[in-house]
Amino acid sequence: MMEPRIEILSTGAELLDGRTADTNAAEIAAALGGIGLRVASTHAGGDDVDEIHALLRDILRRSSLCVCTGGLGPTRDDLTREAVARVCGRPLKLDEASLRNIRDRFAKYNRPMPESNNRQAMFPGGAEILPTRVGTAPGFAVDSDESLIVCMPGVPREMRHMLRESVLPLLRKRFPTSRCIRGKVLRLFGISESSLADTLGEIMNPGRDPSVGTAASHGVISIIIRSHGKDAERVERALAETETRIRALVGKHVFGEGEMNLEEAVAQLLEEHDMTIATAESCTGGMVGALLTNVPGISRFYPGGVVCYGDEAKMELLGVPRETLQSKGAVSDEVARALAEGVRKRFRSDIGVGVTGIAGPAGGTRDKPVGLVYIAVADGQGTESREFRFSGERRAIRLRAALTALNMTRARGSDAEEERSDGKGLTPRFK
Amino acid sequence: MMEPRIEILSTGAELLDGRTADTNAAEIAAALGGIGLRVASTHAGGDDVDEIHALLRDILRRSSLCVCTGGLGPTRDDLTREAVARVCGRPLKLDEASLRNIRDRFAKYNRPMPESNNRQAMFPGGAEILPTRVGTAPGFAVDSDESLIVCMPGVPREMRHMLRESVLPLLRKRFPTSRCIRGKVLRLFGISESSLADTLGEIMNPGRDPSVGTAASHGVISIIIRSHGKDAERVERALAETETRIRALVGKHVFGEGEMNLEEAVAQLLEEHDMTIATAESCTGGMVGALLTNVPGISRFYPGGVVCYGDEAKMELLGVPRETLQSKGAVSDEVARALAEGVRKRFRSDIGVGVTGIAGPAGGTRDKPVGLVYIAVADGQGTESREFRFSGERRAIRLRAALTALNMTRARGSDAEEERSDGKGLTPRFK
């Protein structure tokens, strides 16, 4: 069977004036992928029956399935059912059973049913009605020539229920696929998306199977490997081969798989080594601590830290010498080291992390520009400090600094040899 | 002049397999609305040059402007420039100036420029190049018969800059409009979206002008008021009238306007009162500090804080008595008060904030369930402590706790009388 071409159409004025991002489309695409169906494109149109009709008509010209959300509510700007009735030439009819269900629902909560809710029991002739347990808007599925149109409510919670309980089972039956889709995600830090592309070269070529794509978020890169085919075993093998090739090229930057975060990678290492960590944060103002404490159960490994935004906190709580602050400045290699060592001592932890930098927008000079950050990691073996120059705005610089602090800790604790700008090797393990 | 028909096209495989919702489209639509331009529909297509080409071709048949994002990166799956070149019949040409800029950018950060970045200096012939100060991907604008195509990078931060600095000025010139659209956003905390809808009643009716909508993010509610018409003065007046009615109903929850955050509202109050604040965070692990230090220039008002995740830090650094920890438990009203008072003393600040709670998923008991959080604010007038029960997952509970700590500080410092569950009034001002 040929793979069906699938598109998603979301309707609602709120999608076109900037009030709401279309999260339904992403959620539906993910769910369809789970049953082996790929989405070719998605669309959003306003509460205008002609507009929705025109979009639908174009979609049905190209595709064998259109999944719609939105516009099934009781108000006058809910026009999807009219547009669908028109595009497939099946006038709306009242469904008595649906009307009773809507009435019962209102009765259950002791509320009078507004007249406008009658509209929610109207469907294009011949439609299969998709009941709802959440909300009042039933959905429906209807054929239009060679194509199928499925309509669900736009409220995410209502859509989600209907998708899972009615739509996915329907589509599984209608578009059976022996196709098997498998994917794997590797997570990296410390390499740019473009160097990664250069290093991977033809592995990222469009059209290659398995396909390899990348996505970046605040310096964390995901490499997404996907493959599909009829033979599950062959698909898995192809995936594993590609993963092996990628790891051979950039494995030292890989800190995890799937949805793993840097803070989880650090927590995992702390657990493996049975070590504790404490944080001394100036420019990041608590972000490293906030990231670490995202991880459930981190309290066994993270006694805490100091947000030493002012110089007094650096001196009084962490023992940074006043002379160092005065002669080298708060943003310096020396102060980063003193922070890491000071907080390690103060919290009697195995590892201490110190971060100091200039997040901007003000406070930069020619010698010490905005984006200059020093990060130090101290442990039983000594203290390692590095200088970074991050670009971007205040938030980006700070987040990048916090993530880099976690990554330095991880790299120090793992066997991975990390590239260093100064060419020196890294201490391979804690202690 | 007839109103131009406008569509948005986003490209990227991550938009079609459920990894990412298309937030760029919403952001662009909002910005275009601000200059009187309405978006008719939005579309997303994958990293496939034929697919992007087909979508573009259909859009240009219907519309006079297509705003594209994504697919301008350096990798082989970045194909927007090829698709645009094909649809408007203008082959790609290398732009030497852009190539120099990209080279300079890499040189500035002392990094070699990967070969693949060359592609980012290729543009359809005759295109106007839109420079970038953020990221490496320049955008471009190019004519195709009667229509204009504008292409921006897909990374939201890069897109945002280019939209504001290059694209909006270009579109203002190209599509002048006499239609005036005005909007205003009020920001609230401490009220749910559904209570807000109940309180505002018919003010939120669909079809009303000015229109009133709400959006919620982690407890921060935005009320969006919009109006449009030919007469700017009348539009402004209608907007102001609606704002006055809303403020009369829920004004005590309003902490700011536009895009103001709670941390900025707190910083503004600290500046007005010339006061400093210090933070003692257990379950939030540094989030309150991280939020406060988002605000540029906060160092004058925020000397720092302690992340007291473990009991030792609570006792040793903040002077919480061991007996209190043992008899009342770390998550208690008494410990929250001791943290706020202890950190205020330790940092010699005017205000101290203490947060302690159970973020879960483990660690809850029948008496002290997951989501129980105590927050205390101490100042020269005394200490106020409140108990909260937040729902949701670990991250949601922690963020809600951090934001609530900021809101308690703000409410204490502002003249607003806040609702309290215990019915007691609030100290109206600091000190």
Image: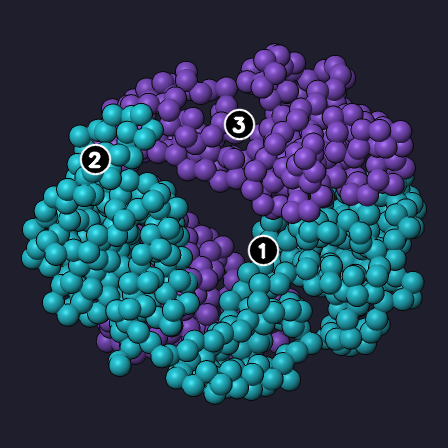
Chain colours: A cyan, B purple
Residue B132 position (above or below residue A343): below
Q: Which chain letter goes with mark 1?
A: A
Specify the amino acid type for callout 2: Asn
Specify the amino acid type for callout 1: Gly
Q: Which chain letter goes with mark 2?
A: A
Is A62 situated left or right of A203 in this image? left
Residue A142 position (above or below residue A348): below
Mark 3–mark 2 Cα distance, whole angstroms, equals 32 Å
Residue B182 position (above or below residue B341): below
Q: Nearer the viewer, mark 3 or mark 2?
A: 2
Is B316 situated left or right of A59 in this image? right
Mark 2–mark 1 Cα distance, whole angstroms, equals 51 Å
Residue B143 placement (x, y as % from top left): 25, 65
Answer yes or no: is residue B379 visible. Answer: yes
**Residue at position x 82%, y 43% in the image:** B310
* Circle 2 residue: A117
Q: Quadrant of the N terminus of chain A?
A: bottom left
Q: Which chain letter goes with mark 3?
A: B
